Image (cartoon, helix red, strand yellow):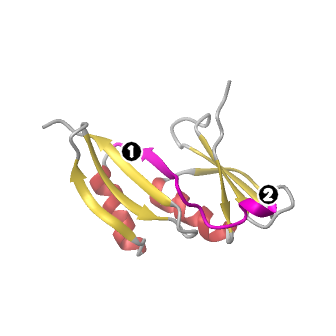
Amino acid sequence: MKILPNICSSDLQASKRFYVELLNLDVKFESDWYVQLCSAENSEIELGIIDRYHDLVPLEYQQQPTGMYLTFVVNDVNTSFQRAQEMGVPLVSEPRNEFYGQRRFLCKDPDNCLVDICSPWQP
């Protein structure tokens, strides 16, 4: 089995730039209605972005996301945070050490999807 999360976007190019620049993802496939990204270290780790208004997306799911967020585990959350600041990414929270052993920050992607970027942390 393989899991491929897909998110909806009202601006594919802006969403692609966000994930490629912030998380150093590679473009694996691209069309006018769909973009598939993958990890630079492991091409089997993928994220799909689909045009929110494409016929494949049911009308009731063509709104901005709520009630979910994407988590990306990176090698150095502080480097990712610095990159997010340089990109002008809307931040929800700055990096902090969490009780469960992760250092993380929260931000929003171009379609207002909550994105959690974290790294393992030892007290």
| Residue range of the region highlighted in magenta in the rendering | 58-75
Q: Which residue is mark 1?
A: 74
Q: Residue at x 59, y 61 (%)?
A: 65
Q: On the image, numbered disc 2 is attached to which residue?
A: 57
Would you say residue 64 sits in the magenta stretch?
A: yes
Left or right for 89, reference 97: right
Q: Which mark is residue 16?
A: none
Q: Quadrant of the rendered structure where residue 32 is?
A: bottom right
Q: Residues within 10 Å of mark 2 (few under 14, many from 20)?
A: few
Percent x, y of residue 96 = 22, 54
Q: Quadrant of the N terminus?
A: top right
Seen from this angle, which residue lies furthest left? Answer: 123
Q: Is residue 18 magenta?
A: no
Residue in the foreground of this view, choosing between 56 and 45: 56
Depicted 79 relative to depicted 112: above or below:
above
- Report the amino acid beneath label 2: Val
- On the image, the x and y values in percent for residue 117 come to 39, 51
Tell me residue 64's x, y (percent). Answer: 62, 67
- Are the residues tagged 1 and 2 within 8 Å (C-beta)? no
Q: Mark 1 and mark 2: span between their CA atoms?
A: 30 Å
Q: Residue 99 at what x, y percent from top left?
A: 21, 40
